[in-house]
Image: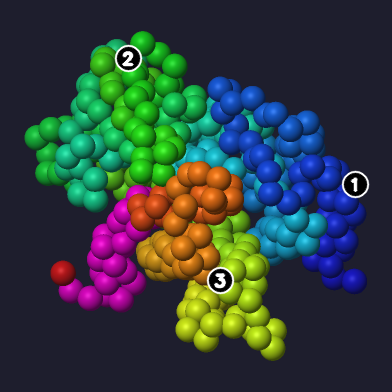
Amino acid sequence: MSELQSFREETRAWLEENCPPGARGPGEVSNGSTKIVIQDPDTRLWLEHMVERGWTVPSWPREYGGGGLSNSEYVVLLEEMKRIKARPALSSFGTSMIGPTLLELGTEEQKQRHLPRIARAEVEWCQGYSEPGAGSDLASLQTRAVIDGDHFVINGSKIWTSGAHNADWMFILVRTDPKASKHEGISFMLLPMDQPGVEVRPIKLISGNSPFNETFFNNALAARDDLVGELNRGWSVGKRLLQHERSGMESLLQGGTSKGRSKLSLIAKEYIGEADGKIADASMRDDVLQYEMAQRSLNLTKRRVIEESADGATPGPATSIFKVMSTDLEKIHNDLTIRLRGHQGFGWEGDAFSAEEVEDMRVMLSSRAASIYSGSNEIQRNIIAKRVLGLPD
């Protein structure tokens, strides 16, 4: 028996013993925020077991709270979790964005101070990038940070700050040299959210939810020890973090797979009906098939990139391909969930519509922003042209 097969059998046995029934299938997932209380006891127990095993961040080194798994072992873990429908125990900006960035670019002191807390689900992070006048053109940001003793004093504002109302810390891009060219003079640093100089105001979206916020800084403080990378050289750190965001192992392997496919099939069966085991309407059947083929092709591409990468290594500019295709397919999938239901798909409220019909309508509206946030698809196509295809400016 190979070592990988032995690991699979050991992992399967451990999951069967330690993953509670309430942690299988859809449900609550911790993001580590100290401001959110986990309600489901099985979710809490599952998190405790995974933290103890180091599998909240399976590929991180053990000294920082991780499981020390290779890429191939991590793939096995995800496959075995999927087999029993186990939810992730922890999903956060800490595990997918700032954690991998600190592993690659942080100091040893920063790693020791921040990474174990992320792995133990003791902290949630938010991202301070976009500003009212600097969205896709992020390098035009104007939030300032000035050195004062052992701290940076920060003034300005950020917008579309996902999860800021529940976050404990923020990783932020700020301008530290206003005289430099716009891509220079930017620094990347970390600051605690619970301080007098930080104010968060939720933004209500068309979907009715408020996951995004405006965040204002009035003499907010970030420790000089929490500067990541070199002073005035934070642009490269910020870009690398976005590559980590777009290429997390779990999202590369599982993003948009069977969940979308099975849901569309169930909706079609209920609202349109079947003929010879197929969606009865030929036009809708073709649209669903085209979506499924594109999604499977993307997933195969993601898996190939993982297999070609060294263990623990994050792909580079190719992650922009994943961002463009994933967000386009997300919108196609959500459009299909509405169209398959006919007029019942357009419910906003009222007894004439089920809770799922209303929820899917709101999700469809929210998904309109998917090709804008985390770097607009237009920007991603520019990156693909320059960094992947090598086309001239």
Q: Which residues are magenta?
A: 370-392
| Left or right of 264 in this view: 173 | left
Instruction: Examine the rendered structure and indicate whether residue 229 appears above or below residue 245.
Output: above
x and y, in percent, of residue 130 in the image: 28, 40
Colour treatment of the image: rainbow
x and y, in percent, of residue 58 in the image: 68, 48
| Left or right of 48 in this view: 16 | right
Q: Residue at x 45, y 47 (%)?
A: 348
Indicate the quadrant where residue 72 lies: bottom right
Is 117 in front, or is 163?
163
The residue labelled by disc 1 is: 17
The residue labelled by disc 3 is: 299
Circle 1: element type: helix
Task: Work out whether mark 2 precedes mark 1 in sequence or the reverse, and give the earlier one.
Answer: 1
The residue labelled by disc 2 is: 197
Q: Amino acid at mark 2?
A: Gly
Is 226 in front, or is 375?
375
Circle 2: element type: loop
Q: Residue at x 48, y 28 (%)?
A: 167
